[in-house]
Image (tube, grey):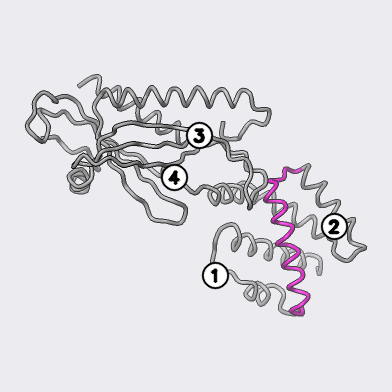
């Protein structure tokens, strides 16, 4: 019974730390976590536990550990228990379960945090046939593509860029995109560690 | 005049195009691999970075850059294939 409660509290603590550190939830504070989960624990004891779990999660997330790596890492941590700073095997089990459900989302958040250029959020387009251009120049008649790109940095609002392109520009873009795809195919085929996205 | 597509917010599009429709002048790209960062030792994430050289209605040239994941790039690529197919038929 006591073990189940301890596991629940620890799972709540890991959730709270993850919300705060990786999902940027500003409502979660160390004080809130203590009051909700570890009311009976002394402040010093709680701070030490919070710090330890935060550090462990940081190591696990930073290395994007798979199951095998995590097992080895946690085993090493439980062996350090004699020194006082280590982990109980119950705590290790909670961490394992926790990481299994959160790994993908934490990784996604870390990738977003390390993207500093605006990202492409959306594309919409329309093709018009122009009888002439704005200046009444019928020499430029033909199909025109209007492409709206929605760009934005993580946590910032979107910026809309509207591009006007004739057929030759669209073909130029397509050719460059073909080159990019070829380069992608090359790195995917040569990389020993294939990305999940590939 | 063109018929608006269903769900087309024509007012917003017209505003946008009148005000800031940009002519594409050139495009440069870079395929990169994010390897490691201060928050993540094992990023290993490929990305496509694009730099668009565009001209505003007054002819002023400026640059717009953005980054895409591989799936985002592939999605954009398929949009442009559709655009080219439509342009060929009109």
Q: Position of residue A37 (x, y in %)?
A: 69, 72
When asked about the image quadrant of residue B61, the answer is top left
Q: Same chain, marks 4 and 3?
A: no
Residue occupied by mark 3: B70
Q: What residue lies at 85% left-to-right and 64% top-to-bottom?
A: A85
Q: Identify the element where label 1 is drawn.
A: loop
Q: What residue lies at 48% left-to-right and 35% top-to-bottom?
A: B48
Circle 3 residues within 10 Å: few <14, some 14–19, many ≥20:
many
In the image as oriented, which residue stretches furthest toward the left? A136
Residue occupied by mark 1: A27
Q: Is residue A132 above or below residue A41?
A: above
Q: Nearer the viewer, residue B71 or A180?
A: A180
Circle 2 residues within 10 Å: few <14, some 14–19, many ≥20:
some
Tag nearer the camera, 2 or 3: 3
- In the image, the segment drawn in magenta is A41-67
Q: Same chain, marks 3 and 1?
A: no
Circle 1 residues within 10 Å: few <14, some 14–19, many ≥20:
few
Residue A119: give its label: 4
Residue occupied by mark 2: A89
Query: Whole-Å distance between the Cαs marked 2 and 1?
Result: 31 Å
Chain ID, mark 1: A
Question: Which of disc 1 and disc 2 is earlier in sequence?
Answer: 1
Q: Position of residue B45 (x, y in %)?
A: 58, 38
Q: Does A151 sit left or right of A51 as displayed?
A: left
């Amino acid at each position: 019974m006591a073990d189940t409660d301890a596991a629940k509290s620890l799972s709540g603590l890991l959730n709270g730390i993850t919300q705060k550190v990786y999902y940027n939830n500003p409502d979660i504070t160390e004080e809130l976590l203590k009051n909700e989960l570890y009311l009976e624990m002394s402040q010093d004891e709680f701070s030490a536990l919070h710090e330890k779990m935060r550090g462990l999660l940081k190591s696990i997330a930073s290395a994007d550990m798979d199951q095998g790596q995590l097992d080895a890492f946690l085993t090493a941590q439980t062996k350090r228990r004699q020194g006082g700073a280590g982990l109980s095997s119950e705590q290790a089990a909670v961490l394992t379960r926790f990481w299994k459900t959160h790994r993908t989302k934490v990784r996604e958040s870390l990738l977003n945090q390390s993207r500093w250029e605006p990202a492409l959020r959306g594309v919409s387009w329309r093709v018009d046939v122009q009888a002439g251009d704005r200046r009444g120049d019928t020499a430029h008649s033909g199909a025109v593509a209007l492409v709206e790109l929605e760009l934005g940095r993580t946590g910032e609002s979107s910026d809309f860029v509207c591009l006007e392109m004739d057929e030759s520009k669209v073909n130029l873009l397509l050719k460059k995109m073909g080159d990019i795809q070829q380069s992608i195919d090359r790195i995917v085929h040569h990389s020993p560690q294939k990305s999940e996205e590939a | 005049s063109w018929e608006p597509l269903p769900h087309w917010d024509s007012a917003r599009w017209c505003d946008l195009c009148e005000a800031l429709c940009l002519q594409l002048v050139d495009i440069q790209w870079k395929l990169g691999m994010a390897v490691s960062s201060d928050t993540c030792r094992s990023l290993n994430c490929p990305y496509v970075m694009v730099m668009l050289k565009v001209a505003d209605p007054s002819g002023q040239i400026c640059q717009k850059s953005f980054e895409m994941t591989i799936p985002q790039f592939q999605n954009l690529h398929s949009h442009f294939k559709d655009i080219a197919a439509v342009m060929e038929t009109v």
